[in-house]
Structure formats: C-alpha cells, structure tokens
Amino acid sequence: MTAFDLRALPAGQVELHDARRRRRWTVDLEPFEIGVVPVTLAQYQAVRGGGAHRRSPVTDVSWRDALRFCNEASAREGLEPAYTLDGSGPRWETGASGFRLPTEAEWEYACRAGSSGPHYGPLDRIAWTADDDVEAPRPVGSKQANAFGLHDTLGNVWEWCWDLLDPARYGDYRVFRGGGFADRAWSVRASTRRGGAPGMSHPDVGLRLARGAAGTGQAAQGWSATADTERGAIRGALPSGWTPLRT
C-alpha cells in the first residue's frame, strides 16, 4: 500500500504556548493537507523497501529518517522534495509540492479540529493509551476520528514535527506530539510537547505526512528560522541545573 490519504484543511488559527518562557501566541495558518492517519509500517516499507503489510503505525523512525521518507515518497509521486539533505543540515524548501512533516502549529490545529479542551472527545474512544493495557501500537483508524476526520492524532504513537523543541535548552532536539500507547491519560493531550534528538528513534514515535506550499524563504505555518535563532539565545543567568547545549 503506497497511497497516502491526506485531508485538505481550511485556513485557521491556533494558540500555542511555551511553558518555559511563559508565553502564548496565536498562529494564522494557510490551507494545507495532512494525513488522515499516521504513516503505517506497510506504507513506510513500500517506499523504503520491505514486505510488511501491517496497518499499525511505523515506529523506531528518527526525525532524520522521517525527512528522508518524505523525500522518497515525494519522488514516487512525481512531487518536488520538501527537504534538502546535505552536509549543511536539513533545510525545508517551504514552497515545494512534496510531502513533509507538519509544523507544530499545523499539528495542533489538525489535532484540535476546532476543540479547545485537552482532548477532542472522550479519551477512551479516540486514543490508545496505557489505560488500554496494550503492548504495541494498534492498527490505525480503529478509534473515533476528530471533527476534521483525522484518526490517532492523540494516543497510539507520538508524531514528529518539523520544529525545534527548545533550542536554548535542548539544542537540535525536534518536537513530537500526541502521546502514545504506553502513556498515561494525563500526558495524552493536544497541548503536550516532547522531543528527541534528530538521529534517535523511539518505539512509540512515528510520523504523519503533511503537504502544501506553505511559504517562501525560511518561514511558514508558524515556524521561522529567525524565531529558532532567537529562541536559542540564552540571556541572563541560567536557571538552576541548566547546562547550555549551544555556545
């Protein structure tokens, strides 16, 4: 199975927050497309090689692996790759037509689907969590969808986003969102942020594809390279216990 079912979402707004900096802000989003379900193991191996036919989400995929997958899936569809992967580090070609990871703002907007609480419905009906007592990701689409028709944005597996987690504290760590099958209900929330090193993989982290010509230059859909640089600057005394990862 190589086809990817993406849903076209309308323009809208989403409020994000940065707990460390105690800051909230509203992001205006242009229309974009996002996967109805996370990328499955069958889809991933159909693109990258392998014979699996499982409809459970692919996991143990690093952020860098996810970028490579996006480019390879784009090439199969005759689309312009979204990422330049060379020695200078990954760059997002924001006007490209190919598959990509959602920005953090796009992910939360897609997950909430107009809702304002921690979940878009009763958690036991919409998400696989530790309360279900399962030992591995479950087949995608087997719990209720949100108002946009998207499944598994909460629970089942965490999903990589393009954005940096907190460059002042964690260097090049990238965000993943959504919670996973082994997480307690209190952490499976639309606003919960976690992240990991871009070269590391995790047994409960996968990805969901996005697509759409989102901008020009180094800014699009709530992300900008300039903002990343500003967030990475450490001003004043370090909080207790901090060891800066960047100089």
Image (cartoon, rainbow, N blue to C red):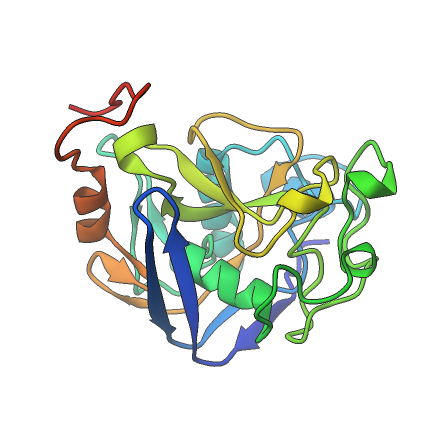
Residue 67: x, y in percent?
A: 44, 43
Residue at 53% over, 76% down:
9
Residue at 72% over, 45% down:
185
Residue 240 against residue 68 in the figure, above or below: above
Q: Nearer the viewer, residue 155 or 18?
A: 18
Asked whether, in this view, residue 35 is left or right of residue 71, the answer is: right
* Number of callouts: 0
Residue at 66% over, 64% down:
36
User: Residue 171, can we see it?
Assistant: no
Asked whether, in this view, residue 167 is left or right of residue 183, the answer is: left
Residue 70 against residue 31 in the figure, above or below: above
User: Residue 216, can we see it?
Assistant: yes
Q: Nearer the viewer, residue 116 or 224?
A: 116
Is the C terminus in the top left, top right, bottom left or bottom right quadrant?
top left
Residue, far right: 133
Residue 128: x, y in percent?
A: 78, 48
Residue 16: x, y in percent?
A: 40, 60
Residue 106 against residue 11 in the figure, above or below: above
Q: Nearer the viewer, residue 209 or 147?
A: 147
Asked whether, in this view, residue 152 is left or right of residue 223, the answer is: right
Residue 72: x, y in percent?
A: 49, 46
Residue at 77% over, 53% down:
140
